[in-house]
Image (tube, grey):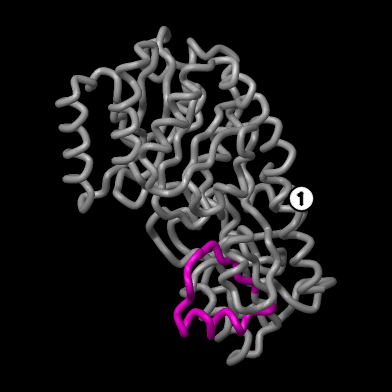
Amino acid sequence: MPKTKNNVDLDEIHVIAPNFKQRLSGVTSTIIQLVPVQNRLGQKVAVLGPGLPSDLPHLRFRDLWKLWRPPEGHTHRVWHARRNIEMLPGIILRDLLRMPLKLVFTSASQRKHSGWTKFLIRQMDAVIATSAKTSAYLEVPNTVVMHGIDCETFRPAEDKAEAKRVCGLAPNLRYIGCFGRVRHQKGTDLFVDAMIAALPRHPGWAAIVAGRATPQHQAFEDELKAKVAAAGLADRILFVGEHTDIANWYRTLDLFIAPQRWEGFGLTPLEAMATGVPVVATDVGAFSELVIQGETGTVIPAGDLPGMIAAASALLEDPDVIDQQGRSGRRHVTQRFALEGEATSLGGLYRRVAI
């Protein structure tokens, strides 16, 4: 039996986080993680739309008529959109129906916007960029608020051998991970090629590809598995599929590689570093703003397979550096990228816009 949604009264809500896309995405994941923390900080946020856990505070569409009345102590509510399909309804509610709303939009895009998107963005009362790179693509004033992560969920293993046993891995091997959707854009093939080159020289290591290949990318994954088998490494480059307990898999790792060819923001380096795992990451998304070169990992050019092999091999040959960078990564993320920091920054922007 499906769980009953935690429906709340709009009179109790100051911020609305619409989610008008059913399919799970990075935006949806951001909302799922942020809203509970925002509410713990007293920001009174509720979600609106499908595809979100039932235990989040949900608004019902039939209650939106109450938006004509602002919350007590405020002149406006905040409508925090993260996609075009959420900006447009906010504009209609504010400008056509004259509801007391302030519109906030978060952009993670690192490409030139279409004319339609530029028009929508110009109607916003405040715009947030998730990185300095994203900010540079915006043609309106904006505030950079970088994503954070839950540093309690993503934490180092107390007993790494036990963490490996929990995931069905060999406790005597050290593991390199690549987590995320299996597709060309995500650079899964670069990771596999790098591991085929590096692992024969490092017999104490193995690699894990964790993530789902959607039907249109299944042939891509099948080709990678065939390449691994042909290299005689099927027992050391493991395709483990998609897992909801991904934090447990991070705790099995000693090195993480983020090989993407393109990314909007990209949380996986933060998740790895929070777990005490150093990172080799391509210079896409916000990765160069997340990883401290030579201190918490290494940033290489996108698509640079020789560079990936060299960076990974240098770490595989120096366990002391791996341990040092892992500790530095954990400290770096807890100090600068805890989810509470992102929520606090958003709360400050909401107050400036809506009070």
Quarter that holds the N terminus:
top left
Quarter that holds the C terminus:
bottom right
Give the vertical position of 136 relative to 44 (above or below).
Answer: below
For the view shown, which residue lies furthest in the top direction?
172
Q: Nearer the viewer, residue 8 or 114?
A: 114
Q: Which residues are magenta?
A: 104-125
x, y (%) of residue 69?
Answer: 72, 80
Give the vertical position of 317 relative to 139 (above or below).
Answer: above
For image coordinates 70% across by 82% down, the residue present is 100
Q: Quadrant of residue 212?
A: top left
For image coordinates 29% across by 34% down, the residue present is 193
Q: What kind of residue is marked 1?
A: Leu
x, y (%) of residue 271?
Answer: 55, 37
For image coordinates 27% across by 44% down, the residue present is 213
Q: Is residue 97 left or right of residue 78?
A: left
Q: How many discs appear?
A: 1
Check if residue 117 falls in the magenta segment. Answer: yes
Q: Quadrant of residue 170?
A: top left
Give the vertical position of 183 relative to 327 (above or below).
Answer: below
Classify mark 1: helix, strand or loop. Answer: loop
Tag 1: Cα neighbours inside 10 Å, few (<14), some, or many (≥20)? few
According to the image, label 1 marks what residue? 41
x, y (%) of residue 296?
Answer: 62, 33
For the view shown, which residue lies furthest in the bottom direction?
96
x, y (%) of residue 265?
Answer: 53, 54
For image coordinates 49% across by 79% down, the residue present is 117
Check if residue 186 falls in the magenta segment. Answer: no
Q: Is residue 208 left or right of residue 88?
A: left
